[in-house]
Image (cartoon, rainbow, N blue to C red):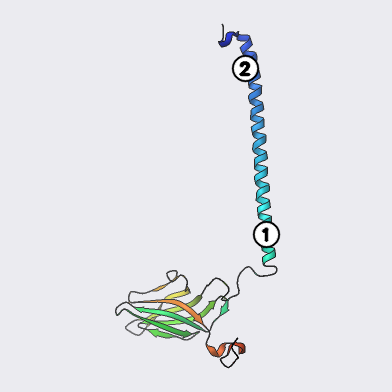
Amino acid sequence: MLWPRGRSTGAHKADASVGNKNFGRRRERAALQRSRLSGMIMNARQIALSTVLAGLALVAPGTPASADRIANSTAVFAALDKVTGRVQPLEIPMGRTVTFGALTITPRACYTRPSTETPLTSAFIEVDEVVLDGSSHRIFTGWTFAESPGLHAVEHPTFDVWLTSCKTPSADISAGRRSNAPKP
């Protein structure tokens, strides 16, 4: 039997065995190239990671990763009466309770970050609802965030309350910032 190009069956078998050897060599070369490529990718990842870590070490040696929080003595809220449409600001000292409609609001902690950092104002509050018979029940206990008022917001069918800021009264400000101190 003649094969294309005038070869006999025996010659074609010999060609096929050479072809198989070449195919095996091509497969070995491709595997070697893949392993070299994966090695280069790993080296690039290691270099990038070490560069980032070195940059962080230069920027902030000995500095904590998170910004220090500032404890404030007063929490400022906005309260909405949905019936009248009235929005009222509430400035409540820590540990004191203020009533807005049927709600009593008690802030326990209010924290901010320094002005040089990304703003993050948070407060831990307790909100109770006073019902018609004079008893009250807790409707919210937890953290609220001024930058994300919808996250952990106090919602009530008639009233909404959300944190707007925290502040320290002027009496708590250090001596260098009092009104009688010379202006910078």
N-terminal label among 2 and 1: 2
Instruction: Tell me which residue sits at (64%, 28%) in the image.
Output: 26
Residue 49: x and y in percent read 66, 55
Quadrant into which the N terminus falls: top right
Residue 130: x and y in percent read 36, 82
Residue 165: x and y in percent read 48, 78
Looking at the rendered image, the disc whose residue lies closer to the viewer, 2 or 1, is: 1
The amino acid pointed to by label 2 is Ala
Position of residue 135 in the picture relative to residue 175 (left or right): left
Quadrant into which the C terminus falls: bottom right
**For numbered disc 2, what is the local secondary structure?**
helix
Are dots 2 and 1 in contact, CB under 8 Å? Answer: no
Q: Quadrant of residue 117?
A: bottom right
Q: How many marks?
A: 2
Position of residue 32 in the picture relative to residue 76 (left or right): right
| Residue at image mark 1 | 53
Residue most extreme to the front: 184
User: For mark 2, does the 10 Å Cα neighbourhood hold few (<14), some (14 to 19), or many (20 or more) residues?
Assistant: few
User: For mark 1, does the 10 Å Cα neighbourhood hold few (<14), some (14 to 19), or many (20 or more) residues?
Assistant: few
Residue most extreme to the bottom: 180
The amino acid pointed to by label 1 is Leu
Residue most extreme to the top: 1
Instruction: Tell me which residue sits at (58%, 10%) in the image.
Output: 5
Q: Quadrant of residue 173?
A: bottom right
Instruction: Tell me which residue sits at (66%, 53%) in the image.
Output: 48
| Residue at image mark 2 | 16
Residue 152 sits above or below residue 77 on the image: above
**For numbered disc 1, what is the local secondary structure?**
helix
